[in-house]
Image: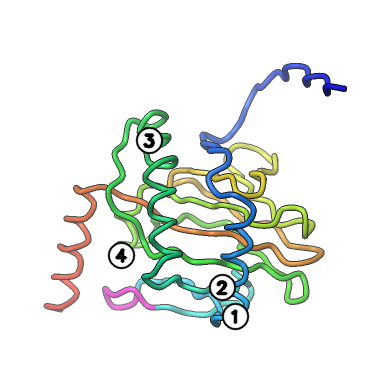
Amino acid sequence: MNKSPEAPRKITNQAPVLFVPNVLDREFCQTLINVWETEGNQESYSMIEHKGELTPIEDDDYKRRRDHFLQEGETHQRLRYFIRQQVRPAIKKAFHFEITRFESFRVGCYDANTGGYFRPHRDDATEGTAYRRFAMTINLNVEDYEGGYLRFPEYGLDLYQPETGSALIFSCSLLHEVTDVIKGQRFALLSFFHGEHEAQLVEEYNRRVMVS
């Protein structure tokens, strides 16, 4: 018997975010989790500006997450393909922006046992990260944990959670947080996107840092 469609909801306010469904299938999501579990991971750091340079720091009161940065190889190539085929055109259609560059893909784990969370922040708040235009989160195992929602405090208290394999895209200038994971482990694929103009900003910043 077919399930009755949900009645339309009246939307009065929401953050300006983009959901892109079914970017990754469940098998590939599990592959990424396996990579995190078997190929090593490290405590995720935050970036601060210190004497004109980006400096990584660990601040457990601010963020608790462990990351694995994906290296070049078959898995990385497949991810690039999925981004080009599904995420890139969706961003162009919704935001009229052509992404051509991305930061390293990382698989992040927020673990309830260590209080997985990321307090409110912006992803482009330093001179060294100002080139970032869009952030991407793809949940890899929504059914296996509780908590760990995305929230955009400037737009209310609503909780955002894309389905397993689906992407949530948003501007890096938006204030956002990851709420505490209260049970299990939340795995997510994370990256940041920008374009050719922003790539020039990166080169200019790197030159200034080398000279200083």
Q: Is mark 1 on a helix, strand or loop?
A: helix
User: Label 2 belongs to which residue?
Assistant: 35
Tell how many labels.
4
Name the residue located 77 percent from the left edge and 59 percent from the top edge: 144
Residues in magenta, as a range: 50-55
The kind of residue tagged 3 is Pro
User: Label 1 belongs to which residue?
Assistant: 38
User: The N terminus lies in which quarter of the figure?
Assistant: top right
Q: How far apart are labels 1 and 4 at the CA level?
A: 31 Å
Which label's residue is closer to the chain start, 1 or 4? 1
Q: How far apart are labels 2 and 1 at the CA level?
A: 5 Å
Which label's residue is closer to the chain start, 4 or 2? 2
User: Label 3 belongs to which residue?
Assistant: 89
User: Label 4 belongs to which residue?
Assistant: 128
**Place of residue 186 in the rendered image (x, y in percent of width and height, measured from the top left):** 69, 62
Image marks 4 and 2: residues in contact by CB distance under 8 Å: no
Q: How far apart are labels 3 and 4 at the CA level?
A: 27 Å
Which label's residue is closer to the chain start, 3 or 4? 3
Image marks 2 and 1: residues in contact by CB distance under 8 Å: yes
Confirm whether the magenta stretch covers residue 131: no
Image marks 3 and 4: residues in contact by CB distance under 8 Å: no
Comparing marks 3 and 4, which lies closer to the viewer?
3
The kind of residue tagged 1 is Thr
